[in-house]
Image (cartoon, grey):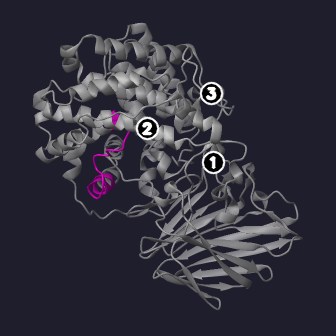
Amino acid sequence: MITEFADSLKNPSTAFTPYPPASDRNAWESIPEDLKKRLIKNGEELLNFHYPSLTATDYMEFSRNGNRSRFQDKLFLRRTALNALVLAECAEHEGRFLDDIINGLYMICEENAWQLPAHNSYIRDTPQFSLPDVTRPVIDLFAAETASVLAVAEYLLREELSAVSPFLSKMINKNLEERIFTPYLEQHFWWMGDGLSKMNNWTVWCTQNVLLAAFTRELDESKKLEIVKKACKSADYFLAEYGEDGCCDEGAQYYRHAGLCLFNCLEVLNGISGNAFLPVYNTEKVKNIASYILNAHVDGIYYVNFADCSPVAGRCNAREFLFGNRTHNRELMAFAASDYQHSEDPLTKDEHNLFYRLQTVFTHGEMMGFEKNPQISHKDFWYESVGIFMARDEHLYLAVKAGDNDDSHNHNDTGSFTIYKDGKPMFIDIGVETYTKKTFSPERYDIWTMQSRYHNLPAFFDGETEIMEKEGAEYRAEEVFCRLGDSICSISMNLAAAYPDERILSYKRSAVLEKGKQITICDHYEGALPNPVLSLIFYEEPILNGNSVQVGNLGSFTIEGASEIRKEVIPITDQRLKTAWNHDIYRLLVTMEKQDLVLTIW
Protein backbone atom coordinates (compact mmCIF):
# COMPACT_ATOMS: atom_id res chain seq x y z
CA MET A 1 0.00 0.00 0.00
CA ILE A 2 2.59 2.57 1.10
CA THR A 3 5.13 1.36 -1.47
CA GLU A 4 2.72 2.28 -4.26
CA PHE A 5 3.09 5.93 -3.34
CA ALA A 6 6.88 5.64 -3.13
CA ASP A 7 7.05 4.11 -6.61
CA SER A 8 5.63 7.29 -8.10
CA LEU A 9 7.92 9.51 -6.04
CA LYS A 10 10.83 10.74 -8.13
CA ASN A 11 12.32 13.55 -6.06
CA PRO A 12 11.78 13.80 -2.29
CA SER A 13 12.37 17.30 -0.96
CA THR A 14 15.71 18.07 0.63
CA ALA A 15 14.69 18.15 4.27
CA PHE A 16 11.95 17.41 6.74
CA THR A 17 11.10 20.69 8.49
CA PRO A 18 7.87 20.19 10.42
CA TYR A 19 8.87 22.36 13.36
CA PRO A 20 10.98 25.51 13.44
CA PRO A 21 14.63 25.51 14.47
CA ALA A 22 15.72 27.58 17.46
CA SER A 23 16.79 30.43 15.18
CA ASP A 24 13.14 31.04 14.25
CA ARG A 25 12.47 33.18 17.27
CA ASN A 26 8.96 34.20 16.23
CA ALA A 27 7.87 30.55 16.35
CA TRP A 28 9.56 29.73 19.66
CA GLU A 29 8.41 32.95 21.28
CA SER A 30 4.85 32.08 20.32
CA ILE A 31 4.66 28.97 22.49
CA PRO A 32 2.71 29.49 25.74
CA GLU A 33 4.72 31.33 28.37
CA ASP A 34 4.10 28.76 31.10
CA LEU A 35 5.35 26.00 28.80
CA LYS A 36 8.44 28.00 27.92
CA LYS A 37 9.24 28.53 31.59
CA ARG A 38 8.87 24.83 32.32
CA LEU A 39 11.20 23.90 29.47
CA ILE A 40 13.81 26.36 30.73
CA LYS A 41 13.43 25.14 34.31
CA ASN A 42 13.93 21.54 33.17
CA GLY A 43 17.13 22.60 31.47
CA GLU A 44 18.36 24.61 34.46
CA GLU A 45 18.17 21.47 36.58
CA LEU A 46 20.79 19.97 34.25
CA LEU A 47 23.25 22.85 33.96
CA ASN A 48 26.82 21.55 34.44
CA PHE A 49 25.36 18.05 34.07
CA HIS A 50 27.73 15.15 34.64
CA TYR A 51 26.88 12.69 31.88
CA PRO A 52 27.29 9.17 33.32
CA SER A 53 30.20 7.10 32.07
CA LEU A 54 29.59 3.93 30.08
CA THR A 55 32.30 1.34 30.48
CA ALA A 56 33.09 -1.90 28.68
CA THR A 57 32.24 -3.87 31.82
CA ASP A 58 28.89 -2.06 32.01
CA TYR A 59 28.20 -3.32 28.50
CA MET A 60 29.35 -6.86 29.28
CA GLU A 61 27.09 -7.16 32.33
CA PHE A 62 24.19 -8.32 30.18
CA SER A 63 26.19 -11.26 28.82
CA ARG A 64 27.63 -12.06 32.21
CA ASN A 65 24.57 -12.01 34.47
CA GLY A 66 21.57 -11.02 32.33
CA ASN A 67 21.08 -7.56 33.84
CA ARG A 68 20.23 -5.01 31.18
CA SER A 69 18.93 -2.17 33.34
CA ARG A 70 22.09 -0.68 34.78
CA PHE A 71 23.73 -0.03 31.42
CA GLN A 72 20.47 1.08 29.79
CA ASP A 73 19.58 3.47 32.58
CA LYS A 74 22.86 5.35 32.14
CA LEU A 75 22.63 5.34 28.35
CA PHE A 76 19.05 6.61 28.39
CA LEU A 77 19.91 9.31 30.96
CA ARG A 78 22.47 10.75 28.56
CA ARG A 79 19.79 11.16 25.92
CA THR A 80 16.99 12.46 28.13
CA ALA A 81 19.37 15.04 29.64
CA LEU A 82 20.46 16.16 26.19
CA ASN A 83 16.83 16.46 25.07
CA ALA A 84 15.93 18.66 28.04
CA LEU A 85 18.95 20.90 27.49
CA VAL A 86 18.19 21.28 23.77
CA LEU A 87 14.58 22.27 24.40
CA ALA A 88 15.65 24.71 27.13
CA GLU A 89 18.08 26.40 24.74
CA CYS A 90 15.42 26.57 22.02
CA ALA A 91 13.01 28.19 24.49
CA GLU A 92 15.46 30.70 26.03
CA HIS A 93 18.05 31.12 23.24
CA GLU A 94 20.72 32.85 25.27
CA GLY A 95 23.47 30.24 24.92
CA ARG A 96 23.34 29.20 28.58
CA PHE A 97 22.82 25.54 27.77
CA LEU A 98 25.11 25.15 24.78
CA ASP A 99 28.20 23.88 26.59
CA ASP A 100 26.22 21.09 28.26
CA ILE A 101 24.56 20.28 24.94
CA ILE A 102 27.92 20.07 23.17
CA ASN A 103 29.26 17.82 25.93
CA GLY A 104 26.28 15.51 25.39
CA LEU A 105 26.70 15.45 21.62
CA TYR A 106 30.40 14.65 22.01
CA MET A 107 29.85 11.86 24.54
CA ILE A 108 27.15 10.16 22.50
CA CYS A 109 29.28 10.33 19.36
CA GLU A 110 32.17 8.87 21.35
CA GLU A 111 30.17 5.79 22.36
CA ASN A 112 31.61 2.69 20.70
CA ALA A 113 28.15 1.49 19.80
CA TRP A 114 24.58 2.76 20.00
CA GLN A 115 22.82 -0.62 20.12
CA LEU A 116 21.88 -2.03 23.50
CA PRO A 117 23.80 -5.06 24.83
CA ALA A 118 20.54 -7.03 24.68
CA HIS A 119 20.34 -6.37 20.92
CA ASN A 120 24.01 -6.84 20.05
CA SER A 121 23.69 -9.54 17.38
CA TYR A 122 23.25 -9.67 13.62
CA ILE A 123 20.79 -12.54 13.27
CA ARG A 124 17.40 -12.58 14.97
CA ASP A 125 17.09 -14.71 18.10
CA THR A 126 20.77 -15.59 18.26
CA PRO A 127 23.09 -15.04 21.27
CA GLN A 128 24.38 -11.52 21.77
CA PHE A 129 28.06 -10.66 21.57
CA SER A 130 29.48 -9.44 24.86
CA LEU A 131 30.98 -6.32 23.24
CA PRO A 132 30.12 -4.51 19.99
CA ASP A 133 32.08 -4.79 16.77
CA VAL A 134 32.87 -1.13 16.05
CA THR A 135 33.56 -1.96 12.40
CA ARG A 136 30.06 -3.31 11.81
CA PRO A 137 27.31 -1.24 13.47
CA VAL A 138 24.04 -2.85 14.49
CA ILE A 139 20.88 -0.83 13.88
CA ASP A 140 18.54 -1.77 16.70
CA LEU A 141 15.75 0.23 18.33
CA PHE A 142 18.04 2.49 20.27
CA ALA A 143 20.79 2.92 17.69
CA ALA A 144 18.09 4.26 15.38
CA GLU A 145 16.60 6.36 18.17
CA THR A 146 20.02 7.76 19.11
CA ALA A 147 20.43 8.76 15.48
CA SER A 148 17.17 10.69 15.53
CA VAL A 149 18.05 12.37 18.85
CA LEU A 150 21.36 13.63 17.46
CA ALA A 151 19.82 14.55 14.12
CA VAL A 152 16.90 16.50 15.57
CA ALA A 153 19.17 18.24 18.11
CA GLU A 154 21.51 19.30 15.30
CA TYR A 155 18.57 20.39 13.13
CA LEU A 156 17.14 22.57 15.90
CA LEU A 157 20.47 24.19 16.84
CA ARG A 158 22.36 24.09 13.53
CA GLU A 159 23.06 27.83 13.44
CA GLU A 160 23.94 28.01 17.13
CA LEU A 161 26.31 25.03 16.97
CA SER A 162 27.95 26.36 13.82
CA ALA A 163 28.67 29.63 15.58
CA VAL A 164 30.68 27.67 18.14
CA SER A 165 32.34 25.36 15.61
CA PRO A 166 31.42 24.17 12.10
CA PHE A 167 32.86 20.78 13.00
CA LEU A 168 30.03 19.85 15.38
CA SER A 169 27.54 19.24 12.58
CA LYS A 170 30.23 17.42 10.61
CA MET A 171 30.86 15.15 13.58
CA ILE A 172 27.17 14.28 13.86
CA ASN A 173 26.74 13.76 10.12
CA LYS A 174 29.80 11.47 9.99
CA ASN A 175 28.43 9.32 12.79
CA LEU A 176 24.99 9.15 11.19
CA GLU A 177 26.49 8.14 7.86
CA GLU A 178 28.75 5.43 9.27
CA ARG A 179 26.46 4.02 11.95
CA ILE A 180 23.04 4.37 10.29
CA PHE A 181 22.74 5.34 6.63
CA THR A 182 25.45 3.07 5.21
CA PRO A 183 24.44 -0.08 7.11
CA TYR A 184 20.75 0.72 6.51
CA LEU A 185 21.25 0.70 2.75
CA GLU A 186 23.90 -2.02 2.51
CA GLN A 187 22.72 -4.60 5.06
CA HIS A 188 19.53 -6.42 5.91
CA PHE A 189 18.42 -6.36 9.53
CA TRP A 190 15.52 -8.67 10.40
CA TRP A 191 13.19 -5.82 11.37
CA MET A 192 13.32 -4.42 7.83
CA GLY A 193 11.09 -7.29 6.70
CA ASP A 194 11.21 -9.66 3.77
CA GLY A 195 7.56 -10.60 3.34
CA LEU A 196 8.08 -13.92 5.12
CA SER A 197 9.43 -13.24 8.62
CA LYS A 198 7.11 -12.03 11.34
CA MET A 199 7.40 -8.33 12.16
CA ASN A 200 6.61 -6.33 15.30
CA ASN A 201 7.00 -2.79 16.62
CA TRP A 202 10.73 -2.79 15.77
CA THR A 203 9.90 -2.38 12.08
CA VAL A 204 8.25 1.02 12.24
CA TRP A 205 10.08 2.16 15.39
CA CYS A 206 13.48 1.80 13.70
CA THR A 207 12.21 2.99 10.31
CA GLN A 208 10.69 6.15 11.76
CA ASN A 209 13.99 7.12 13.39
CA VAL A 210 16.07 6.36 10.30
CA LEU A 211 13.75 8.64 8.32
CA LEU A 212 14.00 11.40 10.95
CA ALA A 213 17.79 11.18 10.94
CA ALA A 214 18.08 11.11 7.15
CA PHE A 215 15.67 13.87 6.21
CA THR A 216 16.67 16.49 8.76
CA ARG A 217 19.90 16.97 6.75
CA GLU A 218 21.25 17.23 3.24
CA LEU A 219 21.66 13.96 1.38
CA ASP A 220 22.11 13.35 -2.33
CA GLU A 221 18.95 12.64 -4.31
CA SER A 222 19.68 9.00 -5.13
CA LYS A 223 20.36 8.14 -1.48
CA LYS A 224 17.19 9.88 -0.31
CA LEU A 225 15.09 7.97 -2.81
CA GLU A 226 16.73 4.68 -1.85
CA ILE A 227 16.01 5.29 1.84
CA VAL A 228 12.39 6.22 1.12
CA LYS A 229 11.72 3.11 -0.95
CA LYS A 230 13.31 0.81 1.61
CA ALA A 231 11.39 2.48 4.45
CA CYS A 232 8.08 2.15 2.58
CA LYS A 233 8.65 -1.56 1.99
CA SER A 234 9.29 -2.05 5.70
CA ALA A 235 6.14 -0.11 6.61
CA ASP A 236 4.12 -2.33 4.28
CA TYR A 237 5.58 -5.48 5.83
CA PHE A 238 4.52 -4.10 9.21
CA LEU A 239 1.00 -3.31 8.00
CA ALA A 240 0.63 -6.79 6.54
CA GLU A 241 0.88 -8.20 10.08
CA TYR A 242 -2.28 -6.33 11.13
CA GLY A 243 -5.83 -7.44 10.67
CA GLU A 244 -8.24 -5.01 9.08
CA ASP A 245 -9.60 -4.24 12.56
CA GLY A 246 -6.28 -2.60 13.54
CA CYS A 247 -5.69 -4.52 16.77
CA CYS A 248 -2.16 -4.32 18.18
CA ASP A 249 -1.24 -7.85 19.28
CA GLU A 250 1.39 -6.34 21.61
CA GLY A 251 -1.18 -4.40 23.61
CA ALA A 252 -1.82 -0.75 24.49
CA GLN A 253 1.66 -0.08 25.84
CA TYR A 254 3.28 -1.24 22.62
CA TYR A 255 0.78 0.69 20.48
CA ARG A 256 3.00 3.65 21.34
CA HIS A 257 5.95 1.91 19.66
CA ALA A 258 3.88 0.36 16.87
CA GLY A 259 0.86 2.31 15.64
CA LEU A 260 2.29 5.67 16.68
CA CYS A 261 5.64 4.95 15.02
CA LEU A 262 3.77 4.07 11.82
CA PHE A 263 2.12 7.48 12.19
CA ASN A 264 5.48 9.25 12.40
CA CYS A 265 6.82 7.27 9.44
CA LEU A 266 3.91 8.67 7.46
CA GLU A 267 4.48 12.16 8.85
CA VAL A 268 8.08 12.20 7.60
CA LEU A 269 7.09 10.70 4.25
CA ASN A 270 4.40 13.34 3.83
CA GLY A 271 6.78 16.06 4.92
CA ILE A 272 9.32 15.24 2.23
CA SER A 273 6.84 14.61 -0.58
CA GLY A 274 4.33 17.44 -0.45
CA ASN A 275 1.81 15.19 1.35
CA ALA A 276 1.88 12.48 -1.33
CA PHE A 277 1.16 9.84 1.33
CA LEU A 278 -1.92 11.50 2.88
CA PRO A 279 -4.36 8.98 1.32
CA VAL A 280 -2.85 6.25 3.52
CA TYR A 281 -4.52 7.89 6.54
CA ASN A 282 -7.92 7.38 4.94
CA THR A 283 -7.58 3.60 4.61
CA GLU A 284 -9.76 1.62 6.99
CA LYS A 285 -6.89 -0.38 8.47
CA VAL A 286 -4.82 2.69 9.36
CA LYS A 287 -7.85 4.46 10.85
CA ASN A 288 -8.50 1.37 12.95
CA ILE A 289 -4.87 1.19 14.06
CA ALA A 290 -5.15 4.80 15.24
CA SER A 291 -8.32 4.20 17.27
CA TYR A 292 -7.05 1.05 19.02
CA ILE A 293 -5.75 3.00 22.03
CA LEU A 294 -9.17 4.56 22.59
CA ASN A 295 -10.96 1.22 22.36
CA ALA A 296 -8.48 -0.51 24.71
CA HIS A 297 -8.89 2.16 27.40
CA VAL A 298 -10.71 1.06 30.54
CA ASP A 299 -10.74 4.14 32.76
CA GLY A 300 -8.24 6.65 34.11
CA ILE A 301 -4.74 5.18 33.88
CA TYR A 302 -5.92 1.64 33.08
CA TYR A 303 -6.00 -0.26 29.78
CA VAL A 304 -6.89 -3.78 28.71
CA ASN A 305 -3.62 -5.66 28.99
CA PHE A 306 -2.29 -9.01 27.85
CA ALA A 307 1.13 -10.37 26.85
CA ASP A 308 3.95 -8.10 28.09
CA CYS A 309 1.69 -5.04 28.24
CA SER A 310 1.13 -3.37 31.60
CA PRO A 311 -2.38 -2.27 32.63
CA VAL A 312 -0.83 1.14 33.27
CA ALA A 313 0.22 1.74 29.69
CA GLY A 314 1.13 5.43 29.97
CA ARG A 315 -0.68 8.68 29.30
CA CYS A 316 -1.51 9.92 25.81
CA ASN A 317 0.50 12.71 24.30
CA ALA A 318 0.77 14.69 21.10
CA ARG A 319 1.20 11.66 18.86
CA GLU A 320 -2.20 10.14 19.68
CA PHE A 321 -3.79 13.56 19.27
CA LEU A 322 -2.13 14.18 15.90
CA PHE A 323 -2.90 10.65 14.68
CA GLY A 324 -6.55 11.31 15.56
CA ASN A 325 -6.41 14.54 13.58
CA ARG A 326 -4.92 12.85 10.52
CA THR A 327 -7.54 10.08 10.58
CA HIS A 328 -10.41 12.53 11.26
CA ASN A 329 -11.18 10.87 14.58
CA ARG A 330 -12.43 13.67 16.81
CA GLU A 331 -13.08 11.30 19.73
CA LEU A 332 -9.47 10.13 19.70
CA MET A 333 -8.32 13.75 19.69
CA ALA A 334 -10.58 14.60 22.63
CA PHE A 335 -9.46 11.51 24.55
CA ALA A 336 -5.76 12.20 23.93
CA ALA A 337 -6.08 15.87 24.88
CA SER A 338 -7.93 15.03 28.08
CA ASP A 339 -5.43 12.34 29.02
CA TYR A 340 -2.58 14.76 28.32
CA GLN A 341 -4.14 17.35 30.62
CA HIS A 342 -4.39 14.76 33.40
CA SER A 343 -0.79 13.61 32.96
CA GLU A 344 1.59 13.82 35.89
CA ASP A 345 4.41 14.46 33.38
CA PRO A 346 2.93 16.10 30.28
CA LEU A 347 6.37 17.21 29.05
CA THR A 348 7.57 13.59 29.16
CA LYS A 349 10.96 14.39 30.70
CA ASP A 350 11.92 10.71 30.63
CA GLU A 351 11.19 10.34 26.92
CA HIS A 352 14.28 9.33 24.91
CA ASN A 353 12.97 10.59 21.59
CA LEU A 354 13.53 14.32 21.08
CA PHE A 355 11.14 14.47 18.14
CA TYR A 356 8.24 13.25 20.29
CA ARG A 357 8.99 16.01 22.77
CA LEU A 358 9.11 18.53 19.96
CA GLN A 359 5.69 17.37 18.78
CA THR A 360 4.39 17.91 22.30
CA VAL A 361 5.81 21.45 22.53
CA PHE A 362 4.11 22.59 19.34
CA THR A 363 0.84 20.72 19.98
CA HIS A 364 0.55 21.67 23.66
CA GLY A 365 -1.61 24.74 23.12
CA GLU A 366 -4.09 22.94 20.92
CA MET A 367 -4.41 20.00 23.32
CA MET A 368 -4.88 22.33 26.29
CA GLY A 369 -7.70 24.00 24.39
CA PHE A 370 -9.79 20.83 24.49
CA GLU A 371 -12.20 20.03 27.32
CA LYS A 372 -10.42 18.39 30.24
CA ASN A 373 -13.17 15.90 31.11
CA PRO A 374 -15.14 15.20 27.92
CA GLN A 375 -17.75 12.51 27.57
CA ILE A 376 -16.00 9.74 25.66
CA SER A 377 -18.20 6.95 24.35
CA HIS A 378 -16.06 3.81 24.68
CA LYS A 379 -17.59 1.03 22.62
CA ASP A 380 -17.98 -2.67 23.26
CA PHE A 381 -15.56 -4.28 20.86
CA TRP A 382 -14.49 -7.61 19.39
CA TYR A 383 -11.03 -7.60 17.82
CA GLU A 384 -11.30 -10.81 15.84
CA SER A 385 -7.76 -10.60 14.38
CA VAL A 386 -6.17 -11.08 17.81
CA GLY A 387 -9.14 -12.37 19.81
CA ILE A 388 -9.74 -9.50 22.22
CA PHE A 389 -13.26 -9.04 23.63
CA MET A 390 -14.20 -5.88 25.56
CA ALA A 391 -17.58 -4.97 27.03
CA ARG A 392 -18.78 -2.55 29.71
CA ASP A 393 -21.71 -1.02 31.49
CA GLU A 394 -21.90 1.83 33.99
CA HIS A 395 -19.94 -0.05 36.68
CA LEU A 396 -18.42 -3.25 35.26
CA TYR A 397 -15.80 -3.81 32.58
CA LEU A 398 -15.03 -7.24 31.13
CA ALA A 399 -12.15 -8.12 28.81
CA VAL A 400 -11.31 -11.61 27.56
CA LYS A 401 -8.29 -12.78 25.57
CA ALA A 402 -9.11 -15.51 23.05
CA GLY A 403 -6.81 -15.95 20.04
CA ASP A 404 -3.64 -17.99 20.53
CA ASN A 405 -0.32 -18.04 22.38
CA ASP A 406 1.73 -16.61 19.53
CA ASP A 407 1.35 -12.88 20.10
CA SER A 408 4.34 -10.60 19.91
CA HIS A 409 5.72 -10.37 23.48
CA ASN A 410 3.51 -13.40 24.15
CA HIS A 411 2.30 -14.72 27.48
CA ASN A 412 0.45 -18.02 27.69
CA ASP A 413 -2.83 -16.27 28.45
CA THR A 414 -5.38 -17.59 25.94
CA GLY A 415 -8.82 -17.54 27.56
CA SER A 416 -7.84 -15.33 30.48
CA PHE A 417 -10.13 -12.50 31.56
CA THR A 418 -9.80 -9.20 33.40
CA ILE A 419 -12.57 -7.36 35.23
CA TYR A 420 -12.72 -3.75 36.45
CA LYS A 421 -15.31 -2.33 38.82
CA ASP A 422 -15.94 1.43 38.72
CA GLY A 423 -12.67 1.88 36.87
CA LYS A 424 -10.59 -0.06 39.43
CA PRO A 425 -8.84 -3.41 38.83
CA MET A 426 -10.75 -6.35 40.32
CA PHE A 427 -9.54 -9.49 38.46
CA ILE A 428 -6.17 -8.58 36.96
CA ASP A 429 -3.53 -9.47 34.39
CA ILE A 430 -0.19 -8.99 36.16
CA GLY A 431 1.98 -7.88 33.24
CA VAL A 432 5.72 -8.49 33.04
CA GLU A 433 8.75 -7.94 35.23
CA THR A 434 11.82 -5.91 34.29
CA TYR A 435 13.38 -7.29 31.13
CA THR A 436 16.50 -9.42 31.56
CA LYS A 437 18.46 -11.73 29.30
CA LYS A 438 16.07 -14.54 30.19
CA THR A 439 13.01 -12.61 28.99
CA PHE A 440 13.87 -13.08 25.32
CA SER A 441 15.54 -16.46 25.50
CA PRO A 442 14.45 -20.12 25.28
CA GLU A 443 13.84 -19.92 29.05
CA ARG A 444 11.19 -17.20 28.65
CA TYR A 445 8.35 -19.40 29.88
CA ASP A 446 10.21 -20.33 33.04
CA ILE A 447 9.37 -16.79 34.17
CA TRP A 448 6.28 -16.89 36.36
CA THR A 449 4.47 -13.90 34.83
CA MET A 450 4.53 -15.58 31.40
CA GLN A 451 2.78 -18.73 32.61
CA SER A 452 -0.93 -19.46 32.36
CA ARG A 453 -1.13 -20.41 36.04
CA TYR A 454 -0.52 -16.74 36.90
CA HIS A 455 -3.41 -15.66 34.74
CA ASN A 456 -7.10 -16.26 35.34
CA LEU A 457 -6.90 -19.74 33.89
CA PRO A 458 -7.02 -23.40 34.96
CA ALA A 459 -4.08 -25.73 35.47
CA PHE A 460 -4.26 -29.53 35.37
CA PHE A 461 -2.32 -32.10 37.35
CA ASP A 462 -0.85 -35.50 36.54
CA GLY A 463 0.46 -36.50 39.95
CA GLU A 464 3.03 -33.85 40.84
CA THR A 465 3.27 -32.55 37.27
CA GLU A 466 1.39 -29.31 36.61
CA ILE A 467 0.09 -28.94 33.06
CA MET A 468 -0.20 -25.34 31.89
CA GLU A 469 -0.87 -23.69 28.54
CA LYS A 470 1.98 -23.79 26.03
CA GLU A 471 3.39 -21.15 23.69
CA GLY A 472 2.84 -21.25 19.92
CA ALA A 473 0.16 -20.53 17.34
CA GLU A 474 -1.19 -24.08 17.56
CA TYR A 475 -2.05 -23.54 21.25
CA ARG A 476 -5.22 -21.58 20.80
CA ALA A 477 -8.86 -21.04 21.60
CA GLU A 478 -11.28 -22.94 19.39
CA GLU A 479 -15.05 -22.79 18.83
CA VAL A 480 -14.95 -19.06 19.60
CA PHE A 481 -18.29 -17.31 19.48
CA CYS A 482 -18.82 -13.64 20.33
CA ARG A 483 -21.95 -11.54 20.67
CA LEU A 484 -22.16 -7.80 21.31
CA GLY A 485 -25.60 -6.51 22.24
CA ASP A 486 -27.23 -3.54 23.90
CA SER A 487 -28.10 -5.49 27.05
CA ILE A 488 -25.90 -8.61 26.90
CA CYS A 489 -22.36 -9.10 25.61
CA SER A 490 -20.81 -12.55 25.64
CA ILE A 491 -17.94 -14.68 24.43
CA SER A 492 -17.44 -18.44 24.59
CA MET A 493 -14.59 -20.73 23.56
CA ASN A 494 -12.98 -24.11 24.05
CA LEU A 495 -9.51 -23.89 25.64
CA ALA A 496 -8.49 -27.56 25.39
CA ALA A 497 -6.20 -26.89 22.40
CA ALA A 498 -4.23 -24.30 24.41
CA TYR A 499 -2.86 -27.14 26.59
CA PRO A 500 -0.30 -29.74 25.42
CA ASP A 501 -2.17 -32.79 26.71
CA GLU A 502 -4.75 -34.78 24.77
CA ARG A 503 -6.32 -36.02 27.99
CA ILE A 504 -7.91 -32.58 28.28
CA LEU A 505 -10.81 -33.31 25.95
CA SER A 506 -12.67 -30.05 26.42
CA TYR A 507 -12.51 -26.96 28.60
CA LYS A 508 -15.30 -24.60 27.63
CA ARG A 509 -15.41 -21.10 29.04
CA SER A 510 -18.09 -18.48 28.60
CA ALA A 511 -18.03 -14.93 29.89
CA VAL A 512 -21.22 -12.89 29.92
CA LEU A 513 -21.85 -9.27 30.86
CA GLU A 514 -25.52 -8.59 31.61
CA LYS A 515 -25.47 -4.82 31.57
CA GLY A 516 -26.66 -3.14 34.72
CA LYS A 517 -26.59 -6.47 36.54
CA GLN A 518 -23.56 -8.80 36.67
CA ILE A 519 -20.76 -10.73 34.96
CA THR A 520 -20.90 -14.52 34.85
CA ILE A 521 -17.91 -16.76 34.06
CA CYS A 522 -18.86 -20.40 33.41
CA ASP A 523 -16.26 -23.15 32.98
CA HIS A 524 -17.09 -26.73 31.95
CA TYR A 525 -14.40 -29.43 31.86
CA GLU A 526 -14.31 -32.89 30.32
CA GLY A 527 -11.22 -35.07 30.35
CA ALA A 528 -9.18 -37.86 31.90
CA LEU A 529 -7.06 -35.71 34.21
CA PRO A 530 -8.26 -34.89 37.75
CA ASN A 531 -10.37 -31.81 38.25
CA PRO A 532 -8.46 -28.63 37.37
CA VAL A 533 -7.40 -25.82 39.70
CA LEU A 534 -8.42 -22.35 38.57
CA SER A 535 -6.14 -19.40 39.38
CA LEU A 536 -7.78 -16.06 40.06
CA ILE A 537 -5.51 -13.00 40.41
CA PHE A 538 -6.42 -9.84 42.35
CA TYR A 539 -4.91 -6.48 43.23
CA GLU A 540 -7.17 -5.86 46.24
CA GLU A 541 -7.27 -8.59 48.85
CA PRO A 542 -10.07 -11.15 48.41
CA ILE A 543 -11.80 -11.98 51.70
CA LEU A 544 -13.46 -15.42 51.73
CA ASN A 545 -16.73 -16.15 53.46
CA GLY A 546 -17.84 -19.61 52.42
CA ASN A 547 -18.36 -19.50 48.67
CA SER A 548 -18.66 -15.70 48.68
CA VAL A 549 -15.66 -13.42 48.14
CA GLN A 550 -15.37 -9.70 48.88
CA VAL A 551 -12.62 -8.02 46.82
CA GLY A 552 -11.32 -5.07 48.84
CA ASN A 553 -13.94 -2.35 48.77
CA LEU A 554 -14.73 -2.92 45.10
CA GLY A 555 -17.32 -5.64 44.91
CA SER A 556 -18.19 -9.27 45.52
CA PHE A 557 -18.52 -12.51 43.66
CA THR A 558 -19.66 -16.04 44.37
CA ILE A 559 -18.04 -19.33 43.40
CA GLU A 560 -20.22 -22.33 42.66
CA GLY A 561 -18.76 -25.79 42.07
CA ALA A 562 -15.53 -25.56 44.11
CA SER A 563 -14.28 -28.27 46.44
CA GLU A 564 -11.48 -26.11 47.87
CA ILE A 565 -10.42 -22.44 47.78
CA ARG A 566 -6.94 -21.39 48.93
CA LYS A 567 -5.46 -17.89 49.09
CA GLU A 568 -1.88 -16.88 48.35
CA VAL A 569 -0.06 -13.56 48.68
CA ILE A 570 2.30 -12.71 45.82
CA PRO A 571 4.88 -10.08 46.83
CA ILE A 572 5.57 -7.37 44.26
CA THR A 573 9.28 -6.54 44.42
CA ASP A 574 10.15 -5.89 40.78
CA GLN A 575 10.42 -2.23 39.80
CA ARG A 576 8.58 -2.62 36.51
CA LEU A 577 5.65 -4.40 38.16
CA LYS A 578 5.56 -1.69 40.83
CA THR A 579 4.60 0.87 38.18
CA ALA A 580 1.21 -0.87 38.05
CA TRP A 581 0.93 -2.59 41.45
CA ASN A 582 2.26 -0.64 44.42
CA HIS A 583 1.48 -3.37 46.94
CA ASP A 584 1.28 -7.17 47.05
CA ILE A 585 -1.21 -8.97 44.84
CA TYR A 586 -3.27 -12.07 45.62
CA ARG A 587 -4.16 -15.40 44.05
CA LEU A 588 -7.07 -17.68 44.80
CA LEU A 589 -6.59 -21.33 43.84
CA VAL A 590 -10.02 -22.79 43.20
CA THR A 591 -10.29 -26.58 42.79
CA MET A 592 -13.21 -27.66 40.64
CA GLU A 593 -15.41 -30.17 42.50
CA LYS A 594 -16.93 -31.88 39.47
CA GLN A 595 -17.16 -30.60 35.91
CA ASP A 596 -18.57 -27.10 36.29
CA LEU A 597 -17.46 -23.90 37.95
CA VAL A 598 -19.43 -20.65 37.93
CA LEU A 599 -18.29 -17.20 39.04
CA THR A 600 -20.92 -14.50 39.44
CA ILE A 601 -19.51 -10.99 39.82
CA TRP A 602 -21.37 -7.83 40.71
Tell me the kind of residue under disc 1: Asp
Q: Are marks 3 and 1 in contact (CB under 8 Å)?
A: no
Q: In terms of sequence position, does the residue under pointer 3 or pointer 1 come before the other? A: 3
Query: Helix, strand or loop at disc 2?
Result: helix
Q: Quadrant of residue 149?
A: top left
In the displayed structure, would residue 300 be above or below residue 133?
below
Q: Which residue is mark 3?
A: 121
In the displayed structure, would residue 488 be above or below residue 578?
below
Q: Which residue is mark 2?
A: 74
Please provide percent x and percent y for residue 268: 36, 27
Q: In terms of sequence position, does the residue under pointer 2 or pointer 3 come before the other? A: 2
In this view, the residue in front, 293 or 127, is 127
How far is mark 2 from mark 1, CA to CA? 31 Å
Other residues around mark 1 within 10 Å, as few (<14) / some (14–19) / many (≥20): many
Q: Foreground mark, 2 or 3? A: 2
Q: Which residues are magenta?
A: 335-356
Q: Residue at x 11, y 44 (%)?
A: 33
